[in-house]
Amino acid sequence: MSTQNEITYAQAVRDAMREEMQRDDSIVLMGEDIGVYRGAFGVTQEMYREFPGRVLDTPISEAGFVGCAIGAAISGMRPVVEIMFSDFMSVCWDMILNQAPKMRFMSGGKLSVPLVIRTAAGCGTGAAAQHSQSLEAMLCHIPGLKVVVPSTPYDAKGLLKSAIRDNNPVVFLEQKLLYRTKGMVPSHDYMVPLGKAEVRRVGTDVTIVTYGRMTGISLQAASKLAEEGISAEVIDLRTLLPLDRNAVTESVKKTKRLLIVHEAVKTGGFGGEIAASVAESEAFYYLDAPIRRLGAEDVPVPFSPVLEKGVLPDAEKICAVIREEVG
């Protein structure tokens, strides 16, 4: 009989990797300081002891070790790469843009690249402008990649297992402030399918579409709005590529209003893709108000905690936009 345990988001990620490595000897971990140092956020704690020779501390060269991982994946291994901060993807952008996602297509299906790139994304830790960005929209513009943004420990474990078993390159974005959050996770083996959104709260007056850390903040806003008689439905996308467009469309047809919330800056953010998807669907004809987007201010993330907090969406900002929509 299966049980559930309350664990942190970080432990859920670690457990997913551990269980998959126990199951499949072809899985290796690669990244800077992921061995004795345990990774920048402690996710790979003690794994180097359990899997000697399969947890590889790399030089400080993202282009080098991501390129190595791509070669290993083509050769039959299933590497899981950790990039300390998602901002550092810029250092290995050629590998992420031109190499990993293109090889299966360019080889006519003869090659596959079963590679997972895990990385800590987003802000809230006072890490300043070069260590706090949310770059998922850039990734979603690359055909051949899959992009995953879990918001709970349950999803972090189940989605990472699915990502590791996938035969395509997957970028797995872990929001830094979620690492210490806790949730119930089954003790038995399970997977969460890529490309399937989750309705976190059912509502009738407005749909909030979000992902990552903004899921919890959107749920806080929905609770506040409920006290005012406004019923908000909260959809957690979980996977941006592939995108569960049908879940969004059906919710908007029901509520007739849409607010998209993400931590990334508003201009060029993934919210624009969601808005366009709804505008091009039958849900457009059900709308009683314009589609709204709420993202971070279009500025580099400040180091100052007060300023950093000020540029981000929060529950009160979400409530303010929805009051305008519904009022």
Image (cartoon, rainbow, N blue to C red):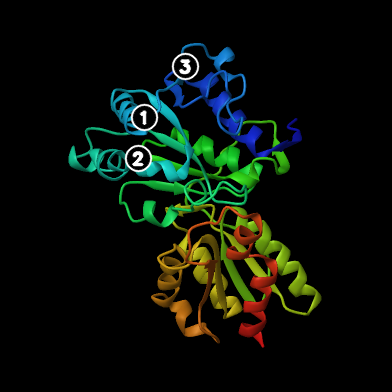
Q: Secondary structure at mark 3?
A: loop
- Cα gap from disc 1 to disc 2, whole angstroms: 8 Å
Q: Can see residue 205?
A: no
Q: Is residue 210 above or below residue 83?
A: below
- The residue at the point 30 percent across, 30 percent down is 67
- The residue at the point 48 percent across, 77 percent down is 283
Q: Can see residue 144?
A: yes
Front of the two marks 1 and 3: 1
Q: Secondary structure at mark 1?
A: loop
Q: Is residue 253 above or below residue 34?
A: below
Dot 1 or dot 2: first in sequence order is: 1
Amino acid type for the residue under numbered disc 2: Val
Q: Quadrant of the N terminus?
A: top right
Q: Position of residue 204 (x, y in %)?
A: 67, 76
Do tag 1 and tag 2 residues touch (Cβ < 8 Å)? yes
Amino acid type for the residue under numbered disc 3: Arg
Furthest toward the right, the residue is 227
Residue 54: numbered disc = 3
Query: Residue under circle 1?
Result: 61
Furthest toward the left, the residue is 107
Q: Between residues 80 and 45, which one lies in front from this camera angle?
A: 45
Q: Tag 2: Cα neighbours inside 10 Å, few (<14), some, or many (≥20)?
A: few
Q: How many marks?
A: 3
Q: Between residues 290 and 307, which one lies in front from this camera angle?
A: 307
Q: Position of residue 256 (x, y in %)?
A: 57, 81
Query: Residue under circle 2?
Result: 91
